[in-house]
Amino acid sequence: MPDTSRVTMVRVNATIEQQSRPAPRRLDASMSLLADIAETALDPDYRRVTQARRESEGRAEAEGARSPSRPRWLGSVALALGLLVVGLLISVAAARVQANAGVISAERESLMERIRVASDDADSLQEQVSSLESDIRALESAQLESTSVGEQVAGQMSTLRSAVGTQRVVGPGITVLLNDAPEDWPGRDPDTSDVLDIDLQQVANALWTAGAEAIAINGQRLTPGSAIRQANDIIQVNYRPLSSPYHVSAVGNDQELATKFDQGAGGQWLRAAKREVGIQFEITIEDDDLVLPAGNATLINAVPEEVP
Amino acid sequence: MIPLIGLALGLAAGFLVDVSVPLGLQPYLPIAIVAAMDALFGGFRSLLEGTFDNRVFVISFVSNVLIASLIVWLGDQIGVGSQLSTAVIVVLGIRIFTNVASIRRQLFHA
C-alpha cells in the first residue's frame, strides 16, 4: 500500500534528522537562568585556581625546583580576617534586632499605658458627669418642691427622664444573657468574638417590641442617642467598649416580656444564631427589681419647638 | 584552626562590643549576611572537594557582600529596593541550597 510506505519514509527521515542534529536541545533550555545559578553555585574560580596550582606544581616538580608558592600564613590570616568579618556581620545584625525588639516592645508598653490612663480619665469624667447631674436634679427638685405646681412639673420631668433614659429606673424585668460559643464548638476561632453587634441590636429591638420600657447592656443604658456598633471585633454601646458575656437587662412586665421576646423576633434570632455559630443565650426573669443606671442624652443644638 | 578562632572572635566582638552601624547601612546588613553565608557555604563545599583556596574565598566573600549590598542600595535609590533584595535573596538562596546539598552528599553520602 502506498500510504504505509510513505509513513515509514517519514519516520526514517525523522530518525535521521534526530541523529544528525549536532547537540540535543536541553529540556530546561528555557530555564537556563535557574540552571546556571545551580550549576555555578560553587564559585568556578575555586576549580580554576586549583587546576592552575596543580599545573604549576606539576611543572615545578618536573623541573625539580621548589614551588614558588605564596607564603601559607598570609592566606590563613586573610581567611581568619574574612571569617572574623562574617562573625561580626552576623552578631552585629543579631544584636541590632534584639535592641530594636526592646525598643518596639517598650513603645507598645507605653502606648498601652497611655490607653489605660486615658480610659481611666474617661471613667472618672463620666462619674463626675453623673454626680453633677444628680446634683442638678437635687437642686431642681428642691426648687420645684416648694410649690404644688412645681411638684407636678418635677413628677412629669422624672417620668420623661426615665422614658428617655437619663434617670435611674427600678422595676421588674428580664435579663437576656449572651455569650460566645463554647470552646469545643466546631470551627470556632478563639480570637474572634461570636456575638456580633447585630445580635445585640436584634435583641434590643426585640425587647422594645416585646414591651420593654428601659434597656441597659452591661450597665450601659440605651438612650435615644445610643449606638450599638462593632469596631475591630469589640462591641461598643454608647461608644464604650464592652466584653462578653453581655447582659441585656430590660425593665417591663416581666412575664409578658419573657414570653413575647422568646416567641418573637428575638428568640428566633438567638435560636438561629445558636444553631449557626453556637452562641449561648439565656432568658431569665429577675426575682428582684432591676435597677438600670442613667444614660446620657444631652441636647446641645436641638431646642424644643414651641407648639403654637 | 586559626580561621575558626577568627569566626568565634568576630561573633563575640559583635555581641560584647557595641558596634554602632551607621543608620544608612543598617538595611543592608541582612542582605550582607545572606551574601556572606553564600560565600561561607561555597568555601566549605570547596574545602570538602579539595579545591579550597584562601584567596578565592576572601575575594568571593568581599565581592559577594559588596555587590549584594550595592544592588539593593541601587534599588533603594530607584524605588525597587525591596524587589531587588528579593531577587538577591532568591539567587543567593538557590546557591546556598545547592551548596549545602552538595556538602550533605559529601559528608553523609546521602
Image: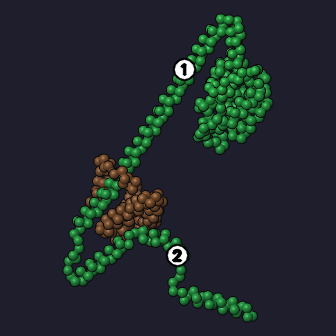
Residue A62 to residue B2: above or below: below
Judge whether residue A225 can be spotted in this image: yes
Asked whether B29 or A176 is in front, the reply is: B29
Disc marking residue A128: 1
Q: Colour of chain B?
A: brown
Task: Kindly identify the residue that appears in the image at 55 percent across and 88 percent down.
Answer: A19
Display colour scheme = by chain
In the image, is A89 to the left or to the right of A180? Answer: left
Question: Residue A127's x, y, as percent?
Answer: 55, 21
- Secondary structure under the numbered disc 1 in the rendered image: helix
In whole angstroms, how far apart are the C-alphas of marks 1 and 2? 79 Å
Q: Which chain is green?
A: A
Residue at 75% in and 32% down: A266
The answer, for residue B4, to whether it is visible in the render is no
- Provide the residue designation for mark 2: A29
Report the front residue among B74 and A57. B74
Q: Is residue A171 above or below residue A230?
A: above
Q: Please state which amino acid type lies under the numbered disc 2.
A: Ala
Quarter holding the N terminus of chain A?
bottom right
- Foreground residue among A261 and A147: A147
Residue located 73% across and 31% down the image: A205
Name the disc covering residue A302, or none: none
Residue A32 rendering spot, x and y as whole percentages: 50, 73
Q: Is residue A247 above or below residue A89?
A: above
Q: Earlier in the sequence, mark 1 or mark 2?
A: 2
Chain to which mark 2 belongs: A
Residue A259, picture quadrant: top right
Q: Quadrant of residue A161?
A: top right
On the picture, is A64 further left or further right than A6?
A: left
